Amino acid sequence: MPNTIKLLLIEDQTLMRQGLKTILDLEPGLRVIGEAGDGERGVQLALELRPDVILMDVQMPVLNGVEATAKLCREWNTAKVIILTTFDRDDYVYQGVRAGAMGYLLKDTPADQLIHTIRRVHEGEVFIQPEIASRALREMMRPTTSTLESLSDREREVLVLLAQGASNKDMAEKLFITEGTVKNHVSNILAKLQAENRTQAADIARKQGLV
């Protein structure tokens, strides 16, 4: 007989949480070992109980589901989180996956699909409902305008020069600043654009029409 999969429910709506517990506890091989009504408490319980799979709501008090997932995965990098929510906004899907979630399901998912996903995630698979997976991928590949709007005027100037192929020395001379200041601006730009290197940052600048 296979080992029982231990589950933790992190959901602020009591009726929803109780309903999930009833459904899951009735399924052979599944057992709910803990419940939390906010993200902060959920992270604490997850680290204490070490469940096999965690079902995480998005909209919660104290710490939302995306923030809780990110915090949990930083402290326990093998945590297996399924985000279960009524929201299918692109940014929630994108942020949830980046935070470390291994699954993403809407709350109107049939019980049998939820159970199937729990088992798949428990086995180490990543599963996002097909109807929203493509949206997550598009969002992960597309920088948003608001990301560029987070840049200061000086950072925009540096990014434009960077995209034009200027070296740190060239930028320093053109902008009348030191090379050290240029390096600091480049580091800030990479962080804000979530770019891994100068090439990615330059590509974002071109796609967004800065050059």
Image (tube, helix red, strand yellow):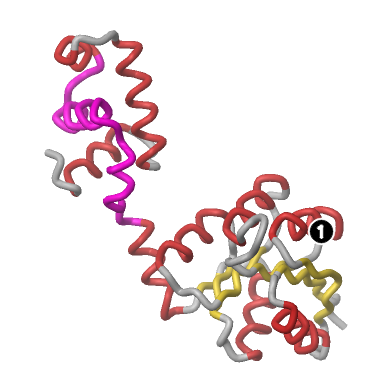
x 68%, y 71%: residue: 55
Quarter occupied by residue 148? top left
160 in the magenta segment = yes
- Look at mark 1 in the image and give the residue it sits on: 45
Q: Position of residue 12 (x, y in %)?
A: 70, 71
204, above or below 158, in the image: below
155, above or below 61, in the image: above
171, above or below 73, in the image: above
Q: Position of residue 105 (x, y in %)?
A: 55, 77
Instruction: Tell me: 74 left or right of 43.
Output: left
Instruction: Pick the residue in front: 60 or 73.
Output: 60
Instruction: Tell me: 128 left or right of 5.
Output: left
Instruction: Pick the residue in front: 169 or 178.
Output: 178
Quarter occupied by residue 80? bottom right
Q: Quadrant of the C terminus?
A: top left
Q: Position of residue 41 (x, y in %)?
A: 77, 57
Give amino acid for label 1.
Answer: Leu
x 30%, y 56%: residue: 142
x 22%, y 12%: residue: 172
Name the magenta segment's main secondary structure.
Answer: helix
Q: Quadrant of the N terminus?
A: bottom right
Task: Please report the bounds of the magenta region as a residue range.
Answer: 141-168
Mark 1 Cα within 10 Å, few/some/many (few <14, many 20+)?
A: some
